Amino acid sequence: MNNIWVICKKELNSYFVSPIAYGLMAFFALVAGFFFYSATAIFVQRSMESQMMGRGFPMSVNEWVIRPVLSNVSVIGLFLIPMITMRLFAEEKRTGTYELLATSPIRDYEIIVGKWVAALIMYACILAVSLLDILVLFAYGKPDWKPMLVGYLGLLLQGGCLLAVGTFISNTTRSQIVAGVGTFAICLLLWVLDWVSAFETAAWAKVVSYLSVLTHFEPFSKGVIDTKDVIFYVSMIFLGLFLTARAMESQRWRA
């Protein structure tokens, strides 16, 4: 466990001593802030129109603001996650420190988990920026915080799943550009698999749709924790890290 934390701290330090972390946070703050402003503006406009027409029915802040913002934030993750993971192993190979790391007394799984945890913490720090927008709602309204926490849990699980995929791809190349593009392509594929169910109802289509990370995030965005969705994300994380371990082992034997 201590070795995992050592690797994790090393990776986190490499993020924050360079412009990477601050650039990603700034980009996320800008885009997420725009989505939050747009959702809030629509909510206020619809509320005023409702009152002017004499309807006066209550409108849920969670449904009109928080849920759309969380859904849009998960889309932003498709662009951020490749930038976070592309350097995990590819940079080590480019600089020639991968061999030193692979032959160190640290076990492969400790290296892999340490790097993945660091990437997950980096992603969580980026998501935390959006909490500044959410706090505005508490200053002027009374949103339900429980569905919000469930939504952020879903974002972390979905992010952990895609980060595990990115960790594996980064371990297969020495080029950060190739790792980033490959991770984005696979993450995008896992995202759009759900579209198959829109025009096909066969059994194979349901299986393909089930593999979509979007399908399993929707319950979280509604404030619902479903065991099958948690199991899916945890299984995908395990699969991604397992494939990374096998890739490291294969590279060691070839060397």
Image (cartoon, rainbow, N blue to C red):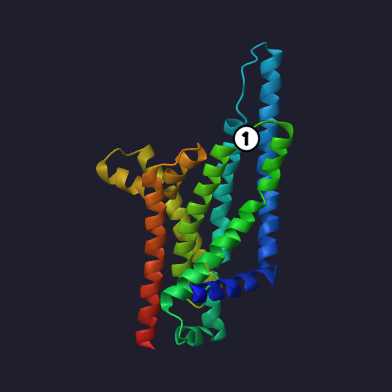
Front-most of 134 and 46?
134
**Image location of residue 56, percent across then percent down:** 65, 15
Instruction: Answer left or right for 238 relative to 52.
Output: left
As drawn, 107 above or below 148: below
Residue at image coords 45%, 84%: 102
**Image location of residue 26, percent across then percent down:** 71, 57
Front-most of 165 and 229?
229
As drawn, 90 above or below 42: below
Residue furthest toward the left? Answer: 203
Residue at image coords 41%, 71%: 244
Residue at image coords 73%, 32%: 140
Number of numbered callouts drawn? 1
**Image location of residue 25, percent across then percent down:** 68, 58
Q: Give the secondary structure at mark 1.
A: helix
Residue 189 occupies which quadrant of the picture? Answer: bottom left
Residue at image coords 50%, 78%: 174
Q: Quadrant of the C terminus?
A: bottom left
**10 Å neighbourhood of mark 1: few (<14), some, or many (≥20)?**
many
**Image location of residue 127, percent across then percent down:** 61, 52
Residue under label 1 = 65
As drawn, 150 above or below 87: above
Residue 242 occupies which quadrant of the picture? Answer: bottom left
Can residue 119 be seen? yes
Instruction: Answer left or right for 54 relative to 96.
Output: right
Disc 1 marks a residue whose amino acid type is Val
Can residue 171 be seen? no
Residue 71 occupies which quadrant of the picture? Answer: top right
Residue furthest toward the top? Answer: 54
